[in-house]
Image (spheres, helix red, strand yellow):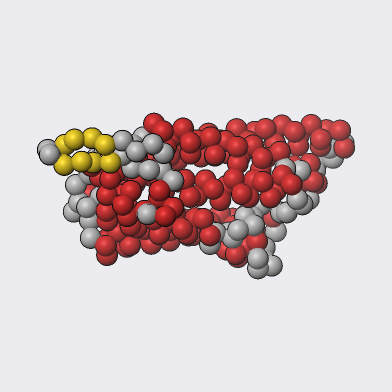
Amino acid sequence: METNVEKNSGTATEKPSLFGVITSPSVQFERIRERPAVWGPLFIVAVIIIVGAVLQSLGTDYSEILKSTDPQGLTAEQMETVGTITKFGAMAGAIFGGIAALFIAPLIYWLCVKISGGVTTYKKMLSLGLFVSLISSFGLLINGIVVFTTNANPLYSVTSLAGIIQSDGVLASVLNNFEIFSVWSFVLLAIGLHKTGGISKKAGWISAIVLFGILVAFSFFSGLINSMAGA
C-alpha cells in the first residue's frame, strides 16, 4: 500500500500497510494505534471474502450432499433444484456472515482490552480486526480455489488438520479449527491486542487463547449436536 506520512506533535506517523502485516505485524499494529486505517483494508478484505465464498459455493455439489441425508422422496430434478437454491443461499450467507463478522469481532476485541485494563477505541479495534482478517480471508480464498478446482471435501478446510487427518463427526469439527491461516490470525491478534490495545503481552495472549478456545468449544458442541441429529 502507498505510504503516507502525517505530522503529529512533531513526529512522523506512517500509515499502516495492510500487506505489511504479513512481514512486519508489530510495526503495523503500532502504527494502527496512532493512525488506524479502515476503508482501504475493508475493501480489500471484503473482496477476498466474497471471491473465496463464491468459489467455495460454486465448487460444492449440494445435490450430492443432500443425497447423503434423508431426501424425503424428492425426485432427481427436485433434488437438483433444492441443491441450486442451497448453493446460492449458502453463498449469500457466507458473504453476509463474513463481512458482518468484520464489524462484530472488533467489539469483542474492545471488550478484551477493557477487561485487561487497556484504553482503546472501536475504530482502532476495527482496523486491527481488518488487518488480522486479511490472513484468515487468505485461508478462505485458498480453500475456495481448491474446492472449485478439485474434488476436495468442501465441508472441511484443506489447510486444517481435518483436511489431513481422516476423521468425521465431532472430531472433524474440532480439527477444522486448527487451520493454518486461522491459527496465524489468532497469533497476530495476540500481538495486536498488545501493540494496538496497549495491554500486556500476557493479557494479549490470554485473550487470544480464550477466544480460540471458545471457537473450538462451539465447534465441539455443534459437531456433537449434528452427530446426535444424524444418529
Q: Position of residue 136 (x, y in %)?
A: 50, 49
Q: In this picture, is 183 found above or below 21?
A: below
Residue 47 percent coordinates (x, y)? 53, 35
Residue 169 in view, yes or no: no
Q: Quadrant of the C terminus?
A: bottom right
Identity of the residue drawn at 19% across and 35% down: 7
Question: Disc count in the image?
Answer: 0
Q: Position of residue 148 (x, y in %)?
A: 72, 44
Q: Residue furthest right?
A: 76
Left/right placement of residue 15 relative to residue 180 reads left
Quadrant containing the N terminus is top left
Expressed as whole percent of the image width and height from the top left, the position of residue 208 reads 37, 58
Q: Name the residue rendered at 27%, 56% in the picture.
A: 194
Quadrant of res 60: top right
In this image, 54 relative to 219: left or right? right
Q: Is residue 36 left or right of residue 135?
A: left
| Whether residue 54 is visible | yes
Place residue 79 in its image quadrant.
Answer: top right
Which residue reaches farthest left? 9
Q: Residue at x 22, y 56 (%)?
A: 199
In the image: residue 156, left or right of residue 18: right
Foreground: 195 or 164? 195
Q: Residue at x 73, y 54 (%)?
A: 152
